[in-house]
Image: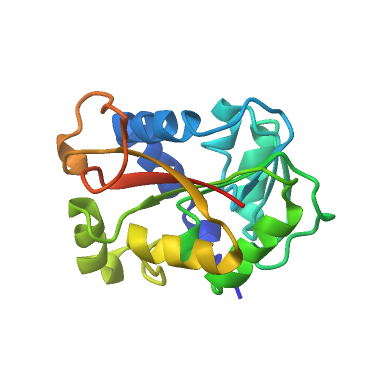
Amino acid sequence: MANTEPFEKHSSRYEHWFDENKYVYESELQAVKEQLPDSNNGIEIGIGSGRFAAPLGIRLGIEPSARMREIARQRKIEALDGIAEKLPFDDARFDFALMVTTICFVDDLDEAFSEAKRVLKPGGPLIIGFIDKKSPVGKIYQQHKNESLFYRPAIFYSVDEVLSHLQKAGFNHFNFTQTIFHHLADVKTIEPVKKGYGEGSFVVIRAVI
């Protein structure tokens, strides 16, 4: 069951992070944008407050936190109650699905990826943005997660671990972008987006059946 309490009680702190870390956010947004297909028929799974969906033109998402859904709706997004493991949509409905900083909060990653596969049209990509567990930022997040309001229950993954779960769900074709090449406090401008992974702390995987 999704642990939404921190997002219900501390939504203002959640929102403040994006303003305080403007260039980190903009860098991550660009890395995701480069992997999105040209379609207006997409969904974000774990849409949060709509910080990624809104600028990316995604107008539909699911989110278990009522407070996050409320903020997302203020950004003109149709935010529905739901979890990644049980999407309230018909089979083969979407051209693409997006998950950004969501997989670390999912209870059953295999089921979440299987559900994403189910609602995607043939050839439609699943795009996943996350902090690589083996990266400098990932290591810091893990070391201090018990001190964090939001990441205390999180499970962080390496790129190889995410790929293993994706392959188990039937995804086989992958494309990678990466960004955030400094510690967050040292990011003073928009970071470059590079192909591949292993250097940047924020990795985006585009996976297709």
Q: Does the rendering let one see residue 157?
A: no
Q: In screen coordinates, is 178 left or right of 58?
A: left
Q: Residue at x 31, y 35 (%)?
A: 24
Residue 203: image x %, image y %? Answer: 36, 46
Could you say which quadrant of the image residue 163 lies in? bottom left
State the residue in front, 114 or 108: 114
Could you say which quadrant of the image residue 202 lies in? top left
Position above or below: 138 against 204? below
Q: In screen coordinates, is 80 left or right of 175?
A: right
Q: Residue at x 54, y 73 (%)?
A: 107
Q: Does the rendering let one see residue 124?
A: yes
State the residue in front, 206 or 18: 206
Position above or below: 95 against 55? below
State the residue in front, 134 or 18: 134
Residue 26: image x %, image y %? Answer: 38, 29
Could you say which quadrant of the image residue 182 lies in? top left
How many numbered marks are there? 0
Residue 137: image x %, image y %? Answer: 22, 52
Q: In screen coordinates, is 75 left or right of 154?
A: right
State the residue in front, 134 or 27: 134
Q: Quadrant of the N terminus?
A: bottom right
Q: In screen coordinates, is 138 left or right of 104?
A: left
Residue 115: image x %, image y %? Answer: 69, 62
